[in-house]
Amino acid sequence: MSKSQIICGIAAAPGIAIGPALVFNPTAAADSAHVGAAEDEVARLDAAIIEVDEAIAEIEEQLRAQGKADEAEIFGAHRMFLGDPGLRDRAVALISAGDQGAAQAIIAAGEEQAAELLTLDDEYLSARAADVRDVVGQVQRRLTGAEGLADLLAAPAVVVARDIGPSDLMSAPRELLLGFALAEGGPTTHSTILARALGIPAVIGLGDDVLRVHQGVTLALDGAAGSLQIDPPADELTRLRGAQADLDAHTAAMRAEIGLPTMTRDGKPVALVANASTPAEALAAREWGAAGVGLLRTELLFLERPDLPGEEEQLGLYAAVAAELPGTPITVRTLDVGGDKHLPAFPLPHEENPFLGWRGLRIGLSQPEILMPQLRALLRAGAAADIRIMLPMVSTLDELRQAKDLLRQAQAQLAEEGVEQAASPQLGVMIEVPAAALNAEALAREADFFSIGTNDLTQYTLACDRGNSRIKDLYQPLDPAVLRLIAMACAAAHRHGRHVAICGELGGDPAATALLIGLGVDELSCGPNSLPLVRAAIRAADMGEAADLARRALECASAAEVRALLR
Ligand code: PEP
Ligand code: MG
């Protein structure tokens, strides 16, 4: 495939990359590898597994020494995949059963595991298929002497691959890896997470067609649009180079604004904080000038493992995130599983309506063995940082009271054990169920703050599954029904001197910033990449105009009318 052509995939990491294609196919060498006697192949396999484990441990160690704890975790998980006896045993069975050598067998065993993971009805777990492929690919390369990405990247290139593993990504020289385009991959594969953290433009999910590009053909990748142009015509190349220069200039201009205060033109301060799940995202948030973390999602630590993370491990995560943004508030949401997120360590029963079922705080309250270690870890992290505890999926005042009770028990336990803890921890609730907004007055009396989860508030207000593409037109965070609930929550909170944040995706939409401020929101929390645009939108807003905009939006009859108003 070398004729000029555009393929569209999923936008994974923003930025434009233009350069020659390097098609990277790490498993190809396995097909032609020499095959010895079965016992020799098993011995070679075992030796290769040990060598790869040592190499990964070294990368993990280096990252930890550099203070990159969450990148190190990725490699810790890789060692777990590699050490899985099921993987080795399957490869040995394949070697013993026929004419497969160690290299083919480990790839086949890994592919079987990857295929199983890909069929799971869980985006995060199925994304781990890339990690399994990464580790078996490394074993195969040891066995065949094939080269890794770092060896092949002799000059700057746009890398094309079926999938790319974190180890290849981390070992490739940053200045030579202009961007990457993958046939597979999902928004939560580790390579995608790392690409965003490292600022490498990437498009994923392009399908097998992309693997047919010729080595060296010019590629132009637009990571924000999710498109890949193969051999673009000269005028298109000129346009893209111009867009790349504009983007660089725009990024530089936004960087220049990082230190400027987030207040409206008429001087009303609006806190601008970030959503994060890992210390790397907290670091990105600091680099974009966030004044703290407004939503630390804690599910990542729980999802990819057979056991529950202990108190110490959780403390490690909360402290590591706080260390990236010292002296700022870090709002940590207690575990929010159920709905579409499953917990391997605590399998949830099948439910007809999981989003209306056992989810979020409902699980925590009925299973204190899950919530208590988290509360203890948060209280302990709060001894050294401004940790704020936030409860997901609150529907009733009674749930808040029960959570307060557990928090008091955790405080009493720590006091009795003589363990240092937060002096006066704040406990807030997410407003993401319409009942919580409608009953905001009562909640505001007893909660320290509100954070509005517009992703779920929209889903529950409009009775519209947020992940169902068939009804996506109904899913409108700007529907006046949702806006009225936001306004109600803000008014009730302010009557009791509480502050209100938005931490759903709407908080990162600069087109909605003035409206949200006008509705009474005090704090906006969004993904690190959205911070510069939201900052600019706050600084461009005026409170009088914003209040007028909010008043008119609340009178609208539909989301379309609201959008027209914002334009
Ligand atoms: C929300 O519902 O808006 C929210 C921030 O929580 P999550 O997207 O994790 O459900
Ligand atoms: Mg939510």
Image: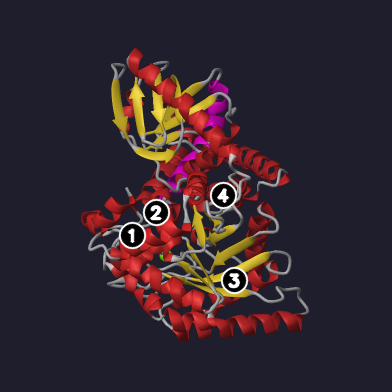
Task: Specify few, some or many for label 4: CA neighbours under 10 Å numbering under 14, 14-19, or 20 or more.
Answer: many
Who comes first in sequence, dot 2 or dot 3?
Answer: 3
Mark 3 or mark 4, whichever is nearer to me: 4
Mark 4 or mark 2, whichever is nearer to me: 2
Amino acid at circle 1: Pro
Q: Is residue 111 above or below residue 555?
A: above
Q: Is residue 202 visible?
A: yes
Residue numbers of the magenta segment: 125-153
Q: What is the CA distance from the residue labelled 3 to the residue labelled 4?
A: 21 Å
Circles 2 and 3, Cβ within 8 Å, touching? The answer is no
Q: What is the CA distance from the residue labelled 2 to the residue labelled 3?
A: 34 Å
**Mark 2 highlights which residue?**
512
Q: What is the CA distance from the residue labelled 1 to the residue labelled 4?
A: 25 Å
Label 4 sits on a secondary structure element that is: helix
Circles 1 and 2, Cβ within 8 Å, touching? The answer is yes
**Mark 3 highlights which residue?**
374
Who comes first in sequence, dot 3 or dot 4?
Answer: 4
Q: Which mark is residue 477?
A: 1
Q: Quadrant of the N terminus?
A: top left
